[in-house]
Amino acid sequence: MSLKGKTAIITGGSRGIGKACAIYLAKQGADIVFNYSNNSSMAEETADEIKNLGVKVQAVKADVKSSQDIDYLFNQALENFNSIDILVNNAGITRDTLLIRMKEEDWDTVLDINLKGVYLTCKAAAKHMMKKRQGRIINISSVVGITGNPGQANYAASKAGIIGFSKSIAKELAPRGILVNVVAPGFIDTDMTSVLGEKVKDNILSQIPLGRYGSPEDVAKLVTFLASDDNQYITGQVINIDGGMLM
Ligand SMILES: NC(=O)c1ccc[n+]([C@@H]2O[C@H](COP(=O)([O-])OP(=O)(O)OC[C@H]3O[C@@H](n4cnc5c(N)ncnc54)[C@H](OP(=O)(O)O)[C@@H]3O)[C@@H](O)[C@H]2O)c1
């Protein structure tokens, strides 16, 4: 599978699952543009790692919930790489708390970053991909968007929203040769999950038939396949990657 000559945009590519996706796509030869929110030093480290793989790379500080920032991100990508072939919507946050304690701001921030961000980037990418009559969009949801989870009503709503949104645009964009899929990870070992207590983690582990947490690389390999020309006939699907947690 070669992605030579293609450009991929990965949101939240500085660390965790997004970083692994950027590295796997780069290993197949894709040039990489990724954005991040705050952590510039980590973004620079990741950009250096990707550059060492022999592809072009640009890290852009851009908040996915801001339409101005997304315009800037896509303008940078088009100016410097002149094509956008792959979009991986990975940036996401949690603000976990029970419904009765959930502040309006906890709701708005999670929905704005996790769901509105996906709308903004997909719209920007689609404009370009429609002209080229080809493209691959992969949106990262979560098994929680399918099952729900106490303490994560805002997060689960955003991740369920990604599924309905992606299926709708998969139908809209299929006639233009653009394939849109959703990847729904289970428990993946990253900064996002490192904050959970040992008891919670042990409980999750006991529900995973394969007996281990997922790694960012597990997710990246699936994303890279869906982004490649090897995928010609999968669109509008939600693919769980969870060690068998949900079956
Ligand atoms: N880890 C899991 O178990 C798991 C399971 C299911 C789904 N997911 C989903 O997978 C995705 C990645 O998760 P992760 O665990 O790798 O997260 P992570 O380690 O916390 O990394 C999050 C990334 O998103 C960026 N980001 C956060 N808010 C942003 C914003 N407003 N604008 C632009 N970038 C932003 C961060 O940039 P900075 O470095 O600048 O903060 C960072 O690069 C998320 O959508 C998450 O919901 C994760």
Image (tube, rainbow, N blue to C red):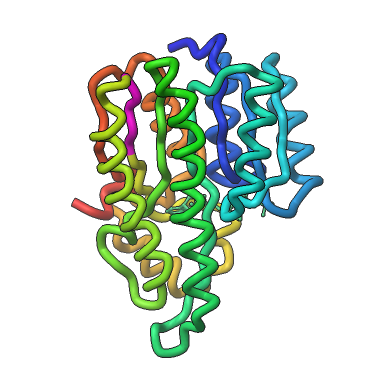
Quarter of the image with the N terminus is top left
Relative to 106, 180 lies left or right:
left
Q: Residue at x 42, y 55 (%)?
A: 187
Residue range highlighted in magenta: 177-181
Percent coordinates x, y for residue 226 in the rendering: 37, 27
Q: Hey, which quadrant is residue 219 in on the image? A: top left
142 to 60, vertically: above or below:
below
Relative to 18, 130 lies left or right:
left
Relative to 13, 116 lies left or right:
left
Q: Residue at x 51, y 83 (%)?
A: 103
Percent coordinates x, y for residue 112 in the rendering: 51, 61
Q: Hey, which quadrant is residue 158 in on the image? A: bottom left
> Which residue is at the far left?
247
Relative to 67, 103 lies left or right:
left
83 to 74, vertically: above or below:
above
Percent coordinates x, y for residue 208 in the rendering: 31, 55
Q: Report if residue 178 lies within the magenta region.
A: yes
Q: Residue at x 33, y 61 (%)?
A: 144
Q: Residue at x 60, y 38 (%)?
A: 19
Q: Is residue 198 visible?
A: no
